[in-house]
Each structure stands twice: as C-alpha cells, then as structure tokens.
C-alpha cells in the first residue's frame, strides 16, 4: 500500500515563512523507519501496510509539532494489499505507456 502525506507546521519562526526545518525532522522519522519512501516537493510517499505506516506518519507529525503548536496533515492512500514495489512500478507502467507514443 502507498500512503502519500504532507505534514507541516501552521506557523514558522523563519522570517521567510519556510517550514523546511520542520519537514526535515519529519523526513528523518520516515527515513529511520526503514520503509521505502520517496520525497517530492509537495508530498512524501511511503510504502507499507497500515500497521507499519500509520505509526510512522504519527511520529512524523509529532516531530513537526516540536516546531509549532499546530500541525497540518494531508494523507492520500492507495490501498492495494498484496502488491509490493509499487512506489516505482506504478511509475514504470505509466512511463511504458508514454514510450509507446
């Protein structure tokens, strides 16, 4: 299963409004989980089952909460039990269609 999530503080101490330090703390949690993941400019996608991924997302939110008293979380999931490696294979299937013209 794939879980795309975005977590960020609602307030930033950075005068530019950047939340990158808080997001980096969340990504450390994801990285340290050992689960496959991909970081993009808007979302982090992590692969695993419910019981593996949801505690990681919660811990990522807790890490961001160290930066702000209020945290925003958006989650989108592709719940397809029994399939692994979909973090890259889904993209590979689309690219194969694109190469067909």
Image: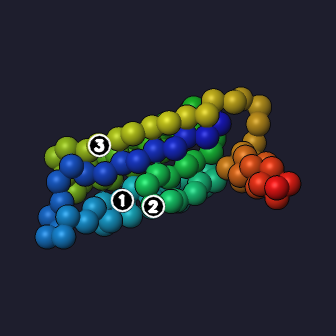
Residue 73 or 54: which is nearer the viewer? 73
Tell me the crowding category of disc 1: few under 14, some 14 to 19, or many 20 or more residues within 10 angstroms, Cα based. Answer: many
The answer to whether any part of residue 8 appears in the image is yes
View extreme (right): residue: 100
Regarding mark 2 in the picture, which secondary structure is present there?
A: loop
Regarding mark 3 in the picture, which secondary structure is present there?
A: strand
Q: Which residue is mark 1?
A: 23
Label located before the other in sequence (1 or 3):
1
View extreme (front): residue: 101
Q: Is residue 46 left or right of residue 8?
A: right
Q: In whole angstroms, how far apart are the C-alphas of marks 1 and 3? A: 11 Å
Q: In whole angstroms, how far apart are the C-alphas of marks 3 and 2? A: 16 Å
The answer to whether any part of residue 32 appears in the image is no
Q: Which residue is mark 3?
A: 72
Q: Which residue is mark 2?
A: 41
Residue 27 in the image, given as x and y percentages of width and height: 45, 59
Q: Is residue 4 left or right of residue 20?
A: right
Label located before the other in sequence (3 or 2):
2
Label located before the other in sequence (1 or 2):
1
Q: Quadrant of the C terminus?
A: bottom right
Q: Is residue 10 left or right of residue 45?
A: left
């Amino acid at each position: 299963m794939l879980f795309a999530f975005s977590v960020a503080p609602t307030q930033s101490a950075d005068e530019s409004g950047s939340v990158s330090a808080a997001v980096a703390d969340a990504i450390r949690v994801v990285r340290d989980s050992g689960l496959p993941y991909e970081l993009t400019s808007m979302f982090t996608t992590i692969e695993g089952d419910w019981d593996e991924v949801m505690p990681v997302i919660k811990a990522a939110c807790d890490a961001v909460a160290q930066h702000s008293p209020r945290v925003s979380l958006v989650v989108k999931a592709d719940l397809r039990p029994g399939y692994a490696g979909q973090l890259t294979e889904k993209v590979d299937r689309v690219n194969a269609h694109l190469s067909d013209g």
